[in-house]
Amino acid sequence: MESWEKFLEEREQARLIRRLSPSEERRPGIVVREGKEFVDFSSNDYLGLSSHPAVVAAARDALERYGVGAGASRLMSGSLSIHHELEEEIAAFKGTERALVFNSGYHANIGIVPALFGRHDLVVADVLSHASQLDGALLSRAKLIRFRHNDPEHLLVLLDKYRDKFRKCLVMTESVFSMDGDLAPLRDLLEICRRRRCLLMVDEAHATGVFGAKGKGRVEAEGLAGEVDLVMGTFSKALGGFGAYLAASRVIVEFLVNSARSFIYSTALPAAVIAANLAALRLCLAGETRGGELLRRSSELREKLREMGWTVGGDSQIVPVMIGESGRAVALSDSLAGRGFLVLPVRPPTVPEGSARLRFSVTTAHANSQINGLLYAISAA
């Protein structure tokens, strides 16, 4: 108990403490906390699909038909026809033979990697890969090494040094990095993987729905559909729903059904969630989402912030403003909240020491007046 209390005290003093703040209401671009309305720039609901009428109606219809829960795991009696329908459409969407739905992005990453790789294998991850990717590697008991962020040459150096000492090798990256908003050099990474007998796993969580033709993601946008070995993503960002998927070959998917512990030992996602995911996916395919417009507006915000003198990163709908010191990031976030804008600080250990930031998530729900208001609030902070 004393060590836990000391931990919390140290976090508090370093301005790194985290607390949960309830919202009484949320809708695309807006949250209400303690009766006050905030413009929400911390949401991943990039396309506002969480409240799209077609998505809500699909969830409601499935709720009436199937009830609240799936009742069992997929390998028992919980595998409904609607789960298989979603997997078939995700496979077509991503250009692969098969797909498998997981209960969350974390479930996917901690299930896929340990199932496919073990103590005689090597995992090489971008140093800024998501925590769930790294946790999956650690659970696999494979040798984990990390290459410099978005640096294919460093990856090649590490593979030349380590690859031949191990049986199988996995290279992991995000296609759009969740905290930096920048883009992985997917084609270069894939070429290196082919030359060094490695499998490539790409996390498309923040790319699905936004990048590529009809929101198919950066793998498709780079002309690599069907070539990347493991394409993982989520329904909980731009698609507005919940859960995750892996798009891969038939052999890999069937192997995971028989070996991925986070899949085997979890109750299936409710049909209402699956139906909502299907509806959002079909909206993308129908061309009714606005990923291109979202990226253009994000670019405009990025440039205006730079003109104001801020250090800004990213090449996507994620616009990080680099602050550095955690206390300063918290103070700036509080100042913006006082002006009606919710922009939460991202601090260590989520990001490296000395790189605390405000992470602005632009969505299609944000009006130009709200973005302009945010810029004015920052200039006055």
Image: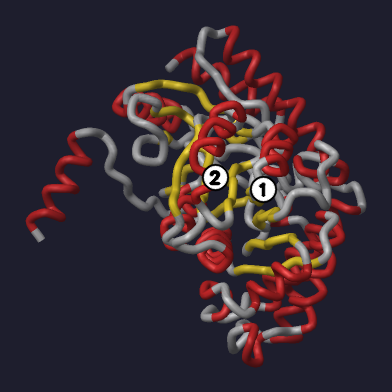
Q: Nearer the viewer, residue 110 or 295?
A: 110
**Location of mark 2 (residue):** 163
Residue drawn 54% across the image and 62% down it: 117
Q: Position of residue 202 (x, y in %)?
A: 65, 47
Residue drawn 56% across the image and 34% down it: 155
Q: Residue furthest left?
A: 2
Horizontal arrangement in the rendering, residue 303 relative to residue 330 (left or right): right
Image quadrant assignment for residue 277: bottom right
Mark 1 and mark 2 in contact? Answer it, CB < 8 Å. Answer: yes
The colour scheme applied to this rendered structure is secondary structure
Q: Nearer the viewer, residue 356 or 187?
A: 187
Distance (Cα) linking label 1 and label 2: 8 Å
Q: Any mark on residue 197, and which?
A: 1
Q: Position of residue 176 (x, y in %)?
A: 64, 38
Q: Which amino acid, mark 1?
A: Arg
Q: Position of residue 375 (x, y in %)?
A: 57, 19
Q: Position of residue 1 (x, y in %)?
A: 10, 61
Q: Is residue 378 above or below residue 139?
A: above
Q: Which amino acid, mark 2?
A: Arg
Quarter placement of the C terminus: top left
Q: Is residue 333 above or below residue 256?
A: above
